[in-house]
Image (spheres, helix red, strand yellow):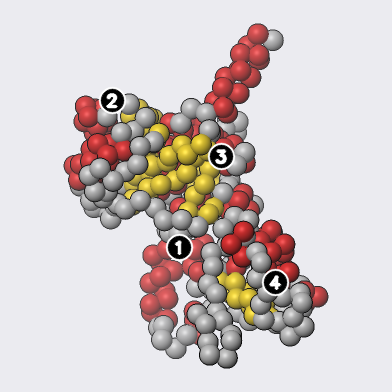
Amino acid sequence: MKFANGSAIVALPCGREGTTLRGFSCDMAILDECNFIPPVVIESVIRPTTIARPQAKIIMLSTPWMKDHPFYEAMTKPERGFKTYTWPTSINPQVTKERLELERKTIGDFDFNREYNAQFIDDEFSYFPSKLILTCTDDYQLNPPEPQKGTVPKGEYYVGIDFGIHQDHSTIAIIQEQAAHKLRVVYLREFPLETPYPLVIGAVRLLNAEYKFRSGYLDQTGVGEALYQEIRQFAPIIKGATLTAKTKQDILGKLKLAMEHGEITIPREPQSLIIQLTQQRCEPTEQGTLKFTHPSGTHDDLAWAFALAVYAYRGPMDWMVMAIGVKRQEW
């Protein structure tokens, strides 16, 4: 947006590396949802845009997210030169105490303290560190919930399905192999509670016809054999997984390994998947396995559908694990 006096406002996505921001100098940089911007973009790209302007300002705004980040340091370290302000929703005259209490009961204390009390939540039992999740995010749009016939590009697609109806949501996640061992989330869908299973199965049938899944997994734990066999009739490539403690560890372990090796890209918006991954906690058990949970009042259905889709993909990490297993057996 250009003004008659020569001033201009430029709005740009940051991306993973901030390449769309390079080449600019500015008098004011406003970083919206700053805690979700990769630190390298802030330190190596945005700050240099103001270095030659003595009166330039950097304004950071964000929902609190992670502490290992320039936004948290700006909020807590006066030597960084920022004036800091915190606005919990409770001071908003347009929001009643009753409405806030309803939100707290609906989403649970964990999300409520972050979203409405503007508190940084540091959970030592988080399985996916916020910093790791952020390195896997990028700015792009997902495919529509109901694709038109013939509009899905050809490619290698993998699907994960998690069933729920009363307390949990039914969810579908689709990933695409865009390059050698590089996966990208292209589709996410969370059905409202009480959605009948036949409607979810119908959606899977339509998606399979368009995406022509290479492979897939569904959570067979609570839905029984009937739903699994119904899906297998039109998509025999989709397998069932019973989520025992050991299986959960295998599935989430593969996802975490792929994220650590930079093989996964997930969208920054909508934030539901990012939030659910961040909320995934784990604690060791006496049996030597990990116990996975999520805070009371929250959901992890979308995260599990995503994890199942990644589990269906066979990449280099699978062969590495298999090779290690053979070596150990021989030894």
Identify the mark nearer the N-term, 3 or 1. 1
Q: Which amino acid does label 4 sit on?
A: Thr
Residue sitting nearer the eye, 65 or 202: 202
**Residue 120, image x and y in percent?**
61, 66
Residue depicted at x 54% and y 53% = 137
Residue at the spot of label 2: 236
Task: Give the distance between the C-alpha atoms of the residues marked 3 and 4, in whole angstroms.
Answer: 31 Å
Circle 4: element type? helix
Residue sitting nearer the eye, 134 or 100: 134
Residue depicted at x 38% and y 42% = 174
Res 105 seen here: yes
Please identify, in this view, whether the residue under mark 1 or under mark 2 is nearer the observer: 2
Q: Which amino acid does label 2 sit on?
A: Pro
Residue at the spot of label 4: 49
Q: What residue type is labelled 3?
A: Glu
- Cβ atoms under marks 3 and 1 closer than 8 Å: no
- How busy is the neighbourhood of tag 3: few (under 14 within 10 Å), some, or many (20 plus)? some
Left or right side of 118 for 205: left
- Cβ atoms under marks 1 and 4 closer than 8 Å: no
Q: Quadrant of residue 5?
A: bottom right
**Residue 245, image x and y in percent?**
49, 33
Residue depicted at x 34% and y 33% = 213
Residue depicted at x 33% and y 29% = 238
Circle 3: element type? loop
Residue at the spot of label 3: 263
Please identify, in this view, whether the residue under mark 4 or under mark 2 is nearer the observer: 4
Please identify, in this view, whether the residue under mark 3 or under mark 1 is nearer the observer: 3
Residue at the spot of label 1: 108
